[in-house]
Image (cartoon, helix red, strand yellow):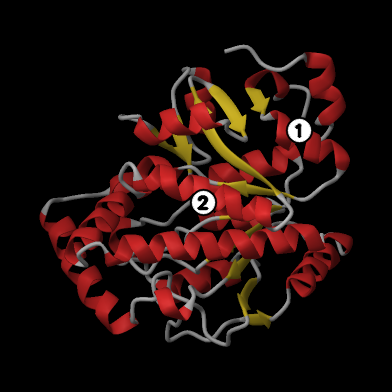
């Protein structure tokens, strides 16, 4: 698939380095918004390729993009399709991605591999942050971030999302670390890396499907405008990296932490028994928890992603 007209591409996307431009396609509505300095919200695609079954994944993607537009911003779903780094997908591309089998799960280590080898893949938090920063998009909405997996003292299984947050200047709006992780150690690593963790309207860090974890929020802000001001101030002071906004799932949609703990423990036991490791761990656990919870985890997952998209759009407008 050929890219956009090179002259228009350069005029509308000055943020993108010259060397990266031949590999990137920016969806026209996203390019127009960026050229006008209008608010844009990046969206990841592993939630489409690896996080939910079809057709819920496609319905969720459409709903999240609609919410971003209703809030006055432009959605930019990021993915790699046939070796093209897409910043913004049209309907046909999103349909195809939602139905695709054998897609890669792309992070910093293999994003360029997928582009060079003409592969298709969903972008994780880390890879989506890279693409967003390339295009000059400063706000990104996701479900939950990756982090330190339980048992990491033996497996060393720590998500690249944490280092990306430390190095790439993008606000990531999530429902906190995924509850399948060691949340306490994830927060410790973020603190060591100098990543601000801001709980939105809460004193405790949310735990993805649940509104509260046992861990106090390092920072709290209650308005999108305050988050935008904090981000601008970091930039003005020359402080590198991004920031994590932890946005609790709406109360009506949460699954209590005690109930989730039982599902998570059972799923982890089956993963260990099956020697599931590496990038396969998170998709496996999410799928097993979906089964154990009789579908409740999926409904909550969709609700929290929509809630994060709404807040991300408001932050983007404030910026």
Identify whether 119 is placed above or below 245: above
Q: In front here: 47 or 204?
A: 47
- Disc assigned to residue 31: 1
Q: Residue lying at the far top in this picture: please name it.
A: 2
x and y percentages locating residue 25 in the rendered image: 65, 25
| Count of labels in the image | 2
Which residue is at 52% across, 19% downward? 116
Q: Badge 2 local density, few (<14 within 10 Å), some, or many (20+)?
A: some
Q: Is residue 103 left or right of residue 244?
A: left
Q: In front here: 160 or 29?
A: 29
Q: Label 2's element?
A: helix
Q: Residue at label 2?
A: 63
**Quadrant of the rendered image containing residue 294:** bottom left
Which residue is at 66% across, 82% downward? 220
The answer to which of marks 1 and 2 sits earlier in the sequence is 1
* Quadrant showing the C terminus: bottom right
Q: Residue lying at the far left in this picture: please name it.
A: 273
Q: In front here: 6 or 165?
A: 6
Which residue is at 45% across, 50% downward? 60
Whether residue 233 is visible: yes
Identify whether 151 is placed above or below 100: below
**Quadrant of the rendered image containing residue 134:** top right
Q: CA distance from mark 1 to mark 2?
A: 21 Å
x and y percentages locating residue 254 in the rendered image: 39, 76
x and y percentages locating residue 178 in the rendered image: 41, 65
Q: Label 1's element?
A: helix
Q: Badge 1 local density, few (<14 within 10 Å), some, or many (20+)?
A: many
Q: Is residue 215 left or right of residue 88?
A: left
């Amino acid at each position: 698939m050929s890219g956009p007209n090179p002259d228009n591409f350069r005029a509308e996307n000055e943020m993108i380095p010259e060397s990266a431009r031949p590999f990137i396609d920016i969806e026209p509505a996203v390019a127009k918004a960026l050229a006008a300095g209008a608010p844009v919200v990046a969206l990841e695609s592993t939630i489409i390729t690896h996080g939910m079954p079809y057709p819920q994944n496609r319905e969720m993607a459409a709903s999240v993009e609609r919410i971003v537009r209703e809030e006055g911003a432009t959605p930019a779903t990021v993915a790699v399709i046939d070796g093209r780094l897409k910043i913004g997908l049209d309907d046909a591309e999103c349909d195809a991605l939602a139905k695709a089998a054998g897609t890669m799960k792309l992070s910093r280590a293999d994003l360029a591999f997928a582009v060079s080898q003409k592969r298709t893949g969903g972008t994780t938090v880390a890879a989506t942050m890279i693409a967003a920063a390339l295009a000059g998009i400063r706000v990104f909405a996701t479900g939950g971030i990756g982090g330190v997996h339980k048992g990491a003292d033996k497996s060393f299984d720590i998500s690249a999302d944490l280092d990306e947050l430390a190095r790439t200047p993008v606000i990531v709006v999530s429902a906190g670390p995924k509850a399948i992780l060691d949340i306490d150690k994830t927060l410790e690593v973020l603190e060591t890396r100098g990543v601000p963790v801001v709980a939105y309207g809460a004193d405790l860090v949310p735990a993805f499907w649940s509104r509260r974890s046992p861990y106090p929020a390092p920072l709290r802000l209650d308005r999108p405008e305050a988050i935008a001001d904090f981000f601008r101030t970091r930039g003005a002071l020359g402080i590198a990296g991004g920031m994590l906004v932890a946005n609790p799932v709406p109360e009506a949609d949460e699954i209590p932490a005690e109930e989730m703990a039982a599902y998570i423990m059972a799923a982890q036991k089956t993963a260990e028994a099956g020697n599931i490791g590496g990038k396969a761990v998170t998709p496996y656990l999410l799928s097993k928890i979906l089964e154990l919870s009789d579908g409740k985890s999926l409904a909550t997952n969709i609700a929290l992603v929509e809630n994060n998209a709404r807040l991300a759009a408001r932050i983007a407008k404030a910026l």
